[in-house]
Image: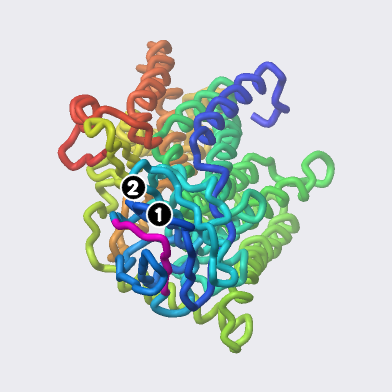
Amino acid sequence: MTEPITKKEFLPLLALVIFYAILSFYNLGNTQSPQTPWTEPHAAVFDFGDIHYISRMQFMIGNRNDVDFMLFTSEDGSDWNFALHVEGFSAFSWDERQINTTARFAQIVPFASGLRVQELAFRNQHNQLIMPAHIFTEGGEVLFDEQHTVPERAHLLNSTYFDEIFHARSGYELLHGLTVFETTHPPMGKNFIAMSAAVFGMTPFGWRFPGALMGVLMIPLMYAFGRMMFKSPFWGLFTAFIFSFDFMLFVQTRIATIDSYVTIFVLASYLCMYGYMQHKIPNPRNNPLWKPLLFLAGSGFFIGLAIASKWQGIYALIGLPILFFPNWYSVLKANKQAAWITFALCFVFFIIIPGTIYLLSYIPFVYSMDTGGGFLQTVIDNQISMFSYHSALLEWHPFASRWWEWPIITRPMFYYSNTLSAYPDVRQGISSFGNPFIWWTGIFATFYAISRLFAILKENGADRPYHADATQAQQLLANRNDLLFLLVAYAAQFLPWVFVPRSTFIYHYFPSVPFVVLLVVFMLKNSKFFEKYPKVVLGYAAAVFALFLLFFPVLSGAPVAFNFVETFLRWFPAWILV
């Protein structure tokens, strides 16, 4: 369906996008966090003005978590007592240590140069902040210049969690030209984090914003896919709706890792390829060649962004040619000139443009990491390093899972857990997995698609069944092409994981999820059972939404009673949710 979107269909889509955006951006993270690090290699000494009882020390370390430091205290400034050795902290995450001593003076002493303390805070027995009256060390004032950002306790709204300690940190390092810690994936996703941090500051909201934005943008892309494939605004909205309330979309785009970027760009690339395949064979009068070429150029552009975000995007280069060449062969039989022009330009679209994007994504990385070998050598060295890392990553992780376990959701990825000290039975948790009503239905939808495709091929033989009228033949041909497209796209993103020996996790399934949704919608639209009982389709959408609401606390990290989770949400023993 290529007709322009009308106001009547645009408004429901806009309402869905706004509703999802509110859910996604609400409590995404604090918009304030310490911005000025203390970076001196020597001790910082400060005077509280009087003797105080110090119960605990809070601190946020910047992008270096590999330098320990010590705390010394004194009542008179002469006799110093060793208070504690601080180690085992995370980047851009609030931490604390119990002190429980009386002191007027204190000093922190780094073990080595490179320590970056974003903010330091001391609290008395009444939990009140104690501010230094005088700081003896030049530059030490930045340790206490943003006390309004000091939280009562560390939690996901003010600190990094899970792999954010790598990717958010690397975005900060790319932004400031510092040595990049996380070098196991291409830099494009971290470039997006860096750009967001430049706008919003190095805050939880800032490092999570671009991923959440990608999640919001995937919804209209899915609408466009559904509308175009199923030739109906209703089915386009239905596709976007059930995708919006898949658990993994919500969780995976709200954490500052790079899976959001590879998924949206893979989706956009396949959408452009599908748009190309919907064009009629070019001719000079009413089907100019430049229109389908724009879709091919878009497909190559987005796959370049996907691969530059994560090597997982390379899997699309398996599926896209399989989809392209049969269509190209049809063009070749009808218009050789257009076909060979298209073929030549595909070298530009799918090699030159993606390669250029990939190299350009390395500009901030090379600026930070160039050791004198030059741009290309730095890029090549990183490719070798990435391959070595992933090929050797065989150590098993407690939440690792194999490819065949992902669709049946045997092992959700447990990202975050916290217990509220005032309410020990109330907990917070975040887990990444799929909406069972979508993913489990997707298993049946995949088998339905395979069986339906074989039935059409058996019945069809040629392009037009001998016993069908023209309309039926055209519909069967369209169904055949759509089934081939969806199964190839899904298989290309999913099946390569069969041959990956390294530790894998359920979030690696994320780029396959849009095609799972499209397979489900295809089944619901074309199955005779659902055609006979159309209200079941609406009931299915309602059930998907209801299940999302039921599981929302363990997807968002909202406080929830432990007994509620154990009774209603932990459907299997391996599901660790809080």
- Marks 1/2 in contact by CB < 8 Å: the verdict is no
Q: Main secondary structure of the magenta part?
A: strand
- Residue 451 visible from this viewpoint: no
Q: Tag 2 or tag 1, which sits nearer the N-term?
A: 1
Residue 439 place in picture, x, y as percent? 34, 35
Q: Position of residue 464 (x, y in %)?
A: 52, 33
What residue is rendered at 22% in x and 40% in y?
Answer: 575
Is 10 left, or right, of 388 in this rendering? right
The quadrant in which residue 499 appears is bottom left
* Highlighted range, magenta: 101-109
Dividing the picture into quarters, in which one does residue 450 lie? top left
Disc 1 packing (10 Å; few <14; some 14–19; many ≥20): many
Image mark count: 2
For residue 306, above or below residue 28: below
Here the colouring is rainbow
The quadrant the C terminus occupies is top left
Q: Nearer the viewer, mark 1 or mark 2?
A: 1
Query: Residue 107 lies in magenta, yes or no?
Result: yes
Determine which residue is flagged by label 1: 58
Q: Secondary structure at mark 2?
A: strand
- In the displayed structure, 393 sits above or below 481; it is below
> Which dot marks residue 415?
2
**Element on which disc 1 rests:** strand
Q: Position of residue 165 (x, y in %)?
A: 42, 59
Is residue 357 in view from this perspective? Answer: yes
- Residue drawn at x 30%, y 66% as measured from the top left: 84
Question: 302 or 158, which is in the foreground?
Answer: 158
